[in-house]
Amino acid sequence: MKTLVIYYSRTGITKKIGQAIASKIQADAEEIVDLKDRKGPWEYLKAGRDAMKRVPAQIAVVKNNPEYYDLVVIGTPVWAGNMACAIRTYISQNKDKIKKLALFCTMGGSGDQNTYAEMESLSGKTAVAKITIKTREAGKPETEARLDEFVKQLSL
Ligand SMILES: Cc1cc2nc3c(=O)[nH]c(=O)nc-3n(C[C@H](O)[C@H](O)[C@H](O)COP(=O)(O)O)c2cc1C
């Protein structure tokens, strides 16, 4: 099954998980680039507000066409209980090209369920599998085991 892993990451946690998933299943992977600077404390506040208000971001042109894949796995950090703005844009622009969807997110502590519900509703698809990794769990051996379980579900 040809799989594409898509992720947005502001500080590298979601990127780390996305790359781990992609390498476990030899999938292509692509990072979505938000054209807005999201670095400083003021930008942090604005990012949370934008995510909550469902404001899409402007994103850099993507390289891989999701139409050519059987499965697209999309990952986002949870922002104010929702998906990051760049992922909102990606899903809006590509939902009709996605055949089968799986989701992952990273978060400090809560908001994953609402994030998944919004991603499924926006894409018009029910995810075949989902996994949430808390920021402090990234890179731990038990997380590796959970990621192995997640990728097994992708091929069912
Ligand atoms: C603007 C903003 C809002 C956030 N809101 C939440 C939240 O609602 N719930 C939560 O558990 N973590 C929240 N976080 C923490 C991130 O989801 C978490 O640190 C994530 O792992 C960061 O991923 P990244 O390194 O890929 O950017 C927020 C982070 C940012 C920047």
Image (cartoon, helix red, strand yellow):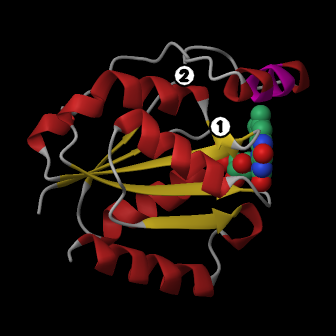
Q: Residue at x 24, y 58 (%)?
A: 27
Residue hosting label 2 = 34
Q: Secondary structure at mark 2?
A: loop
Magenta span:
43-48
| Nearest the eye: 104 or 59 | 104
| Nearest the eye: 57 or 27 | 57
* Quadrant where the image shows the N terminus: bottom left
Residue 62 visible in rendering: no
Q: Is residue 26 above or below residue 15?
A: below
Residue hosting label 1 = 10
| Number of numbered discs overlaid on the protein picture | 2
Q: CA distance from mark 1 to mark 2?
A: 9 Å
- The amino acid pointed to by label 2 is Asp
Residue 46 within the segment the image draws in magenta: yes
Report x, y in % for residue 52.
Answer: 73, 29
Q: Is there CB contact under 8 Å for labels 1 and 2?
A: yes
The answer to whether residue 58 is left or right of residue 65 is: right
- The amino acid pointed to by label 1 is Arg
Crowding near the residue tagged with mark 1, few <14, some 14–19, many ≥20 C-alpha atoms within 10 Å: some
Q: Secondary structure at mark 1?
A: loop
| Nearest the eye: 1 or 64 | 1
Marks 1 and 2, the one that precedes in the sequence: 1
Q: Residue at x 62, y 66 (%)?
A: 133
Residue 86 visible in rendering: yes
* Quadrant where the image shows the C terminus: bottom left
Distance from mark 1 CB to nearest ligand 1 atom below 8 Å: yes
The answer to whether residue 29 is left or right of residue 85 is: left
Which is the main secondary structure of the residues drawn in magenta? helix
Q: Is residue 43 above or below residue 18?
A: above
Crowding near the residue tagged with mark 2, few <14, some 14–19, many ≥20 C-alpha atoms within 10 Å: many
